[in-house]
Image (cartoon, grey):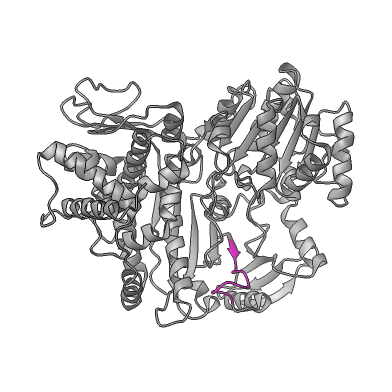
């Protein structure tokens, strides 16, 4: 096993702001959401454990009491999450009303299948009661049966909104589109991971533009904790059987959720029960199974008896006993209740165990959303818990194997997840063009020397967790939709970029890469495909900001590491200094300079320390052999860049230039002329 090297390691200020309540009992995120309670369509983007369920209770009660809505229907992806919306005595903390659900209308707690529950939705709509809780599936069937008109003048609150998709095959997404088109309901949508694993849009751009967005970042959430200070995220490689290497990364003294691989995954042995047995054997000597909780008691080599909850067990009665013991309300604040949870499909979304210090996942998961949900299990704040981590354990790709493509894909996906989490965990970037009239922004701190009007400046607001960064040559968005994307969607754009296979393959392994092939051409194409209604100028404004956000995060990490190459990468508190150091080193931040940086350089640096050198060379050879020629579509982009180059320099770019970017522009422009001559453009 290679020495574990976190690809992301972030440290926070522990200022307690996100866990402090106001006079109504609202935490910071809830207060921010409640201020927007009058909006008809509200989207709350906030991390796990930030209190979205209670935020909805406050908003829903106001809509029922003061905004004339008849009823509130809360829609959750699975029955277990329905418990998040059980009765809550909000008045006890200062609010003017309590959240009360008549037991028969919490359909997540009612026995029976969806058929009977759909009938219950119909009865609820005819009743004078005000709040119903049901699953996404029950709601879909109810809309199919009763139509959308019966939901007029009601609040539809959709929890874990990333399950919805604008894809026509996604029925919940289609129903939501119909409800928004009719425009007679209020919608509150909540999610802790807005991007989808397949980079598919959650809403159509037209529908999304109707939503007012409340964003509470991971930075604000973790920076405002009292106890948790540091979060490490890493992908580590192994050879052979993962069960044999597990104890290299699994510390029995840490509270851990271990997700073993799906039986169809490359990392699986095909027998999940034998894997669990093997893990237990590796941890120590089996003592007994507790008759009350169903937890296995295992004595470690140190002589300590640890409690292991096995959620992989197929016997429904045994698994239910363990699951019930894990949810026991009286044990929520008992750190010693359980030590290790072994799961496969469970203990992810909505699973609340505040003591979890290590989320250890074997094999790549199907989507980035799932990874973020798993990481969220370890980011709860708890007394005495100062550090937590997520580890993705992945089998090293062996280029001599027949399954090399699948193995390389898993590696690339793990790196993509790491890069994305680095963006998600960082403070928020606000970019502004540097002009002769630029001035300092109130509330931002500009470093020891303060604001300098003669150069580009980097300001940081500790309270809001936001950067204000000046960049020369930065294009401004012209439409409201482009402004919204620049404000709210940069991480979604970066998600699509890092999940684009040719992008990450070439960014990591093509030694002849000209960075602009990715930052200019490929990023521009991804934005155009994702937002087809945007004009070219707006596409460029979004593209520049997405590239700047990603490259500044990577360069800041590099700046922090330069003095000590063996130190673990850090971000956030160090990221602030790193961004400033990079800005000072280059004198002025210029968009052409930022475009000329390969966003994957630092990821490759981490990868080269984590993977066997010979294996890395084999992977590089496989990917380099797949390099493609300039496409007709890319040639158009290069021709436009060449035209701009000619205006700025008084000459066309040269095929023999020493600058690889200029040479590529010339090649692209030549290819464009050839394609046009061939009639490839209409």
**The N terminus is located in which quarter?**
bottom left
Q: Is residue 72 above or below residue 339?
A: above
Question: Is residue 604 visible to us here?
Answer: yes
Residue 449 location in percent, x, y?
Answer: 19, 29
- At 26% across and 48% down in the image, what residue appears? 638
- At 25% across and 50% down in the image, what residue appears? 597
Q: Is residue 336 above or below residue 572?
A: below
Quarter occupied by residue 211: top right
Q: Is residue 613 above or below residue 582?
A: below
Question: Is residue 100 visible to us here?
Answer: no
- At 30% across and 56% down in the image, what residue appears? 678
Residue 116 location in percent, x, y?
Answer: 89, 47
Q: Is residue 264 left or right of residue 386?
A: right
Task: Report the magenta residues as a range.
Answer: 257-268
Residue 458 location in percent, x, y?
Answer: 27, 33
- At 63% across and 36% down in the image, what residue appears? 189
- The main secondary structure of the magenta stretch is loop
Quarter occupied by residue 34: top right
């Amino acid at each position: 096993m290679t020495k574990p090297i976190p690809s992301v390691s972030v440290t926070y200020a522990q200022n307690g702001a996100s866990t402090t309540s106001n006079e109504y009992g609202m935490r910071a995120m809830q207060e921010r959401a409640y201020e927007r309670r009058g909006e008809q369509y509200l989207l709350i983007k906030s991390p796990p454990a930030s209190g979205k369920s209670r935020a909805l209770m406050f908003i829903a009660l106001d809509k029922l009491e003061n905004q004339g809505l008849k009823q509130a229907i809360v829609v959750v992806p699975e029955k277990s999450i329905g418990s998040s919306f059980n009765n809550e005595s909000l008045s006890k903390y200062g609010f003017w009303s309590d959240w009360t659900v008549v037991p028969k209308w919490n359909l997540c707690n009612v026995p029976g299948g969806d058929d009977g529950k759909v009938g219950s939705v119909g009865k609820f709509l005819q009743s004078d009661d005000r709040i119903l809780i049901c699953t996404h599936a029950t709601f879909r069937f109810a809309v199919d049966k009763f139509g959308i008109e019966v939901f007029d003048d009601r609040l539809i609150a959709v929890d874990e909104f990333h399950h919805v998709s604008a894809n026509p095959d996604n029925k919940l997404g289609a129903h939501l589109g119909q409800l928004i088109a009719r425009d007679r309901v209020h919608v509150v949508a909540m999610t802790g991971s807005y991007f989808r694993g397949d980079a598919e849009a959650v809403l159509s751009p037209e529908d999304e533009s109707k939503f007012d967005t409340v964003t509470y970042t991971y930075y604000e959430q973790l920076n405002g904790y009292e106890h948790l200070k540091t979060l490490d995220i890493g992908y580590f490689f192994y050879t052979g059987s993962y069960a044999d290497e597990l104890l290299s990364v699994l510390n029995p003294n840490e509270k851990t959720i271990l997700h073993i691989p799906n039986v169809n995954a490359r990392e699986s042995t095909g027998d999940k029960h034998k894997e669990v047995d093997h893990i237990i054997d590796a941890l120590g000597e089996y003592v007994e199974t507790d008759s009350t909780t169903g937890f296995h008691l295992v004595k470690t080599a140190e002589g300590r008896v640890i409690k292991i909850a096995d959620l992989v067990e197929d016997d429904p009665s045994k698994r239910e006993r363990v699951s019930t013991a894990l949810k026991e309300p009286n044990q929520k604040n008992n750190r010693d209740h359980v030590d290790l949870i072994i799961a496969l499909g469970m203990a992810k979304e909505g699973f609340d165990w505040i003591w979890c210090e290590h989320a250890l996942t074997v094999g790549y998961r199907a989507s980035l959303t799932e990874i973020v949900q798993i990481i969220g299990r370890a980011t709860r704040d708890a007394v005495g818990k100062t550090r937590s981590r997520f580890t993705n354990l992945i089998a090293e790709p062996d280029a001599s194997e027949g399954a090399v493509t699948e193995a390389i894909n898993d590696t690339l996906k793990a790196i993509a997840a790491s890069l994305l989490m680095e963006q998600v965990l960082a403070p928020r970037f606000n970019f502004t063009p540097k002009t002769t009239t630029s001035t300092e922004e109130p509330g931002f701190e500009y470093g020891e020397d303060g604001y300098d009007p003669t150069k580009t400046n980097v300001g940081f607001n500790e309270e809001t967790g936001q950067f204000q960064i000046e960049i020369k040559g930065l294009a401004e968005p012209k439409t409201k939709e482009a402004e919204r994307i620049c404000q709210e969607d940069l991480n979604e754009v970066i998600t699509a970029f890092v999940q684009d296979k040719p992008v990450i393959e070439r960014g990591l392994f093509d030694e002849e890469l000209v960075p602009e092939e990715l930052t200019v051409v490929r990023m521009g194409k991804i934005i155009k495909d994702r937002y087809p209604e945007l004009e070219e100028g707006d596409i460029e404004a979004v593209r520049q900001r997405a590239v700047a956000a990603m490259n500044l995060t990577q360069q800041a990490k590099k700046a922090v590491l330069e003095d000590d190459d063996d130190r673990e990468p850090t971000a956030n508190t160090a990221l602030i200094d790193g961004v400033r150091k990079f800005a000072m080193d280059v004198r002025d931040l210029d968009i052409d300079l930022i475009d000329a940086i390969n966003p994957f350089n630092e990821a490759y640096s981490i990868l080269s320390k984590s993977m066997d050198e010979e294996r890395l060379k084999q992977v590089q050879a496989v990917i380099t052999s797949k390099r493609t020629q300039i496409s007709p579509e890319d040639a158009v982009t290069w021709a436009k860049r060449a035209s701009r180059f000619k205006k700025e320099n008084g000459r066309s770019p040269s095929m023999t230039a020493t600058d690889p970017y200029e040479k590529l522009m010339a090649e692209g422009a030549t290819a464009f002329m050839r394609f046009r001559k061939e009639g490839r453009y209409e």
